Image (cartoon, rainbow, N blue to C red):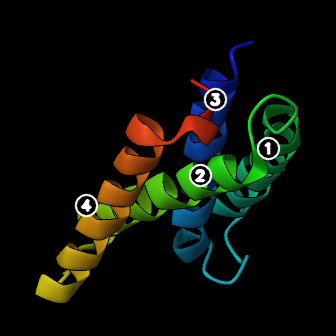
């Protein structure tokens, strides 16, 4: 399987897991708790497989950056969490960092 496809799956799994943490209410609700565990297990299983072909720093930067942005968006949509200007600026800088890394770095393996 393509490393970037596996990375996308790992990111989605991590975002589902992290977003489900709040809904699990301290692991007192079964379905969200199962999503947390399944999401993190999936993500942490895939990450070392991806790192066989892509550099660890690149994988982690993309995984974290995209995950942060996606979880912030989920927080807004599902949990009605409001972000302020500095939060949007920070998220924009994270996106810019991932774009620079992917678009211009020779270490990203593309």
**Residue 109: mark:** 3
Q: Are marks 1 and 2 in contact (CB under 8 Å)?
A: yes
Which residue: 30% across, 60% down?
Answer: 73
**Earlier-in-chain disc, 4 versus 2:** 2
* Crowd band around label 2 with a 10 angstrom C-alpha radius: few (<14), some (14–19), many (20+): many
Position of the N terminus, as image quadrant, is: top right
CA separation in Å, label 2 and label 3: 15 Å
- Name the residue nearer the viewer: 15 or 25: 15
- Which circle marks residue 9 in the picture? none
Which residue is at a point 79% across and 43% down the rendered structure image? 47
Report the residue that reaches farthest toward the left.
85
* Mark 4 in CB contact with mark 2 (< 8 angstroms): no
Image quadrant for the C terminus? top right
Instruction: Return the residue at label 4.
Output: 77
Residue 99, image x, y percentages? 35, 46
Query: If you read the primary sequence from the N terminus, does the residue marked by circle 4 or circle 1 appear first?
Result: 1
- Label 3 crowd bin: few (<14), some (14–19), many (20+), radius 10 Å: few
Instruction: Work out whether residue 106 can be spotted.
Output: yes
Residue 35 position, x and y percent, is 68, 52
Earlier-in-chain disc, 2 versus 3: 2
Separation of residues labelled 3 and 4 (CA atoms): 33 Å
**Of circles 4 and 1, which is in front?**
1
Q: Residues within 10 Å of mark 4 (few under 14, many from 20)?
A: few
Query: Mark 1 vs mark 2: which is more N-terminal?
Result: 1
Q: What distance separates the C-alpha of mark 3 from that of mark 1? A: 15 Å
Q: CA distance from mark 4 to mark 1?
A: 27 Å
Residue to which mark 1 is pinned: 47
| Left or right of residue 56, residue 18 in this image | left
Look at the picture and state if 96 lies above or below 87. above
Query: Can residue 16 be seen in the rendering of this structure?
Result: no
- Towards the viewer: 7 or 75: 7
Q: Nearer the viewer, residue 25 or 2?
A: 2
């Amino acid at each position: 399987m393509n490393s970037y496809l596996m990375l996308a799956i790992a990111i989605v799994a991590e975002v589902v897991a992290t977003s489900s943490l709040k809904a699990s209410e301290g692991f007192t609700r079964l379905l969200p708790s199962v999503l947390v565990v399944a999401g993190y297990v999936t993500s942490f299983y895939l990450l070392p497989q991806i790192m066989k072909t892509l550099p660890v720093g690149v994988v982690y930067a993309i995984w974290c950056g995209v995950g942060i942005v996606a979880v912030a968006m989920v927080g807004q949509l599902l949990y009605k969490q409001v972000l302020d200007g500095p939060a949007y600026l920070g998220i924009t800088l994270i996106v810019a960092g991932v774009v620079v890394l992917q678009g211009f770095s020779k270490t990203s393996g593309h």
